[in-house]
Image (cartoon, rainbow, N blue to C red):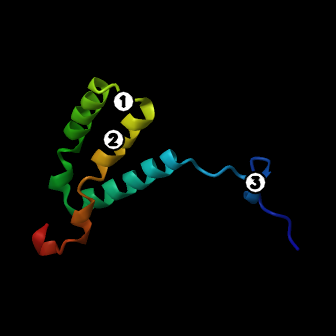
Amino acid sequence: MAAPARNGGLSITEQPAPDDDGLAVCAAAALEASLRARAPGVQASTPLVRQLAARVGRELSLDTQAQAQLDVAVRIRDVGMLALPDSMV
């Protein structure tokens, strides 16, 4: 039987699992890229909406994790557009 592959001194089975926040950010980035490719005009407002959401989060005194979750929500707010037929986008 072959030895487990090594990565940075730890076997693959010993690698720490990515945290949920890191996975959410990666998933949001992938969905955001898909939305940008599918409907570029829709995603054009995302930087402004992210700025406004960040400001609201600060005004509400949200903790760092809640602000990060708010940013993920803003980035994927139009994810349903991926399911629409081309004629409706």
Q: Secondary structure at mark 3?
A: helix
The N terminus lies in quadrant: bottom right
User: Which one is earlier in the sequence, the residue at label 1 or at label 3?
Assistant: 3
Left or right: where 37 falls relative to 14: left
Q: Secondary structure at mark 1?
A: loop
Marks 1 and 2 close (CB-CB < 8 Å): yes
Residue 14, numbered circle: 3
Residue 3 position in % (x across, y down): 86, 65
Question: Disc 1 designates what residue?
Answer: 62
Question: Disc 2 designates what residue?
Answer: 70
Amino acid at the residue labelled 2: Leu
Viewer-nearest residue: 38 or 71: 71
Tell me the crowding category of disc 3: few under 14, some 14 to 19, or many 20 or more residues within 10 angstroms, Cα based. few
Amino acid at the residue labelled 3: Glu
Quadrant assignment, res 46:
top left
Q: Residue at x 81, y 63 (%)?
A: 4
Q: Nearer the viewer, mark 1 or mark 3?
A: 1
Quadrant assignment, res 59:
top left
- Work out whether 37 lies above or below 69: below
Residues under labels 1 and 2: Cα distance?
A: 9 Å
- Work out whether 10 lies above or below 37: above
Tell me the crowding category of disc 1: few under 14, some 14 to 19, or many 20 or more residues within 10 angstroms, Cα based. some
Q: Residue at x 21, y 40 (%)?
A: 49
- Work out whether 42 lies above or below 70: below
Residues under labels 2 and 3: Cα distance?
A: 32 Å
Tell me the crowding category of disc 2: few under 14, some 14 to 19, or many 20 or more residues within 10 angstroms, Cα based. some
Residue 5 position in % (x across, y down): 77, 61
- Work out whether 53 lies above or below 15: above
Viewer-nearest residue: 70 or 30: 70
Marks 2 and 3 close (CB-CB < 8 Å): no
